[in-house]
Image (cartoon, helix red, strand yellow):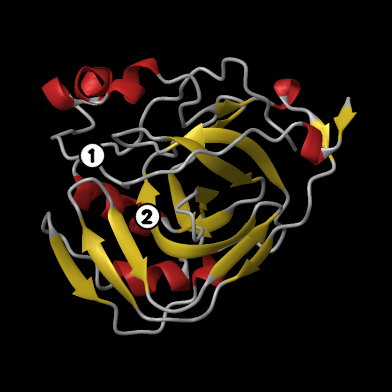
Amino acid sequence: MRLTLPSILLACTSFTTLAGDGHWEYTGKHGTAHWGEEFALCGNGVNQSPIDISASKTIEADLPSLVINYQESNAISINNGHTIQANIKGNSTFTNDAGTFNLLQFHFHAPSENTINGKHFPLEVHFVHADQDSRLAVIGVMFEEGKKNTELEKIWSDMPESKQSKEQLINALSAAKLLPKEKSYYRFNGSLTTPPCTEGVRWFVLKDTIEASKAQIDKFSKVMGTNTNRPTQPINARIVLQ
């Protein structure tokens, strides 16, 4: 089945925060199984992320090409206790049918949060964007274990290893080099993957992967000290386009 994009896009709600005020973790008494006790949407939301993207359940659609204009810039690297996050300075944008979204930050999860046909990847990066109305769009990219990633190493070499710490990246960072050349994608409506699990987030998960070395993947996992992925959530009535 092939549908035109305007007829099947879901509405996107506004967000007010990228992180909840309450305490949460990935494991233990404040772990993913208990998020819904303090953050209602994490427990009763119907469009939650991440998801398992099954090729047999996606719908072919006339999706527009992604227009990504990431500029080389400096960034602040932060260890917030849940991930390593790079806060971007400068004017890097992503444009889709809903308008232009500014790149705010990108961060990592190990193993991947979204899965493809049930497969986890060793690392996933989320590029988080917001438009002038505070609507979110996230581009997800999967890493395969392979050769050393030189752009990733710029972040890893200055990786803050203590929780709630930050480092200024010395080298100019090119977020575009953390994207694969081919940018075909899966598209669905979802949420933040961390509390408060705010819904109304446009998700674009790229089909192609990039590489990072085993040492790079292991360094992230060692610094974080635990898996940093939320389990996949029910798709419910959502449509996944490709």
Residue 131 seen: yes
Q: Amino acid at mark 1?
A: Gly
* Mark closest to the chain's N terminus, 1 or 2: 1
Q: Which residue is mark 1?
A: 20
Q: Which residue is mark 2?
A: 107
Position of 85 with respect to 182 (left or right) is left
Give the number of the disc on residue 142: none
Q: Nearer the viewer, residue 225 or 54?
A: 54
Q: Amino acid at mark 2?
A: His
Q: Where in the figure is residue 128, as x and y percent of width and height?
A: 45, 54
Q: In the picture, residue 110 is in which quadrant?
A: top left
Compared with 230, 219 (above or below) is below
Residue found 71% across the figure and 52% down from its top: 97
Badge 2, how many Cα within 10 Å: few under 14, some, many 20+?
A: some
Q: In the picture, residue 227 is in which quadrant?
A: top left
Q: Where in the figure is residue 188, as x and y percent of width and height?
A: 62, 35
Nearest to the eye among marks 1 and 2: give it: 1
Q: Nearer the viewer, residue 96 or 173?
A: 96
Residue found 49% across the figure and 70% down from its top: 175
Residue 114 seen: no
Residue found 50% across the figure and 36% down from its top: 200
Element at label 1: loop
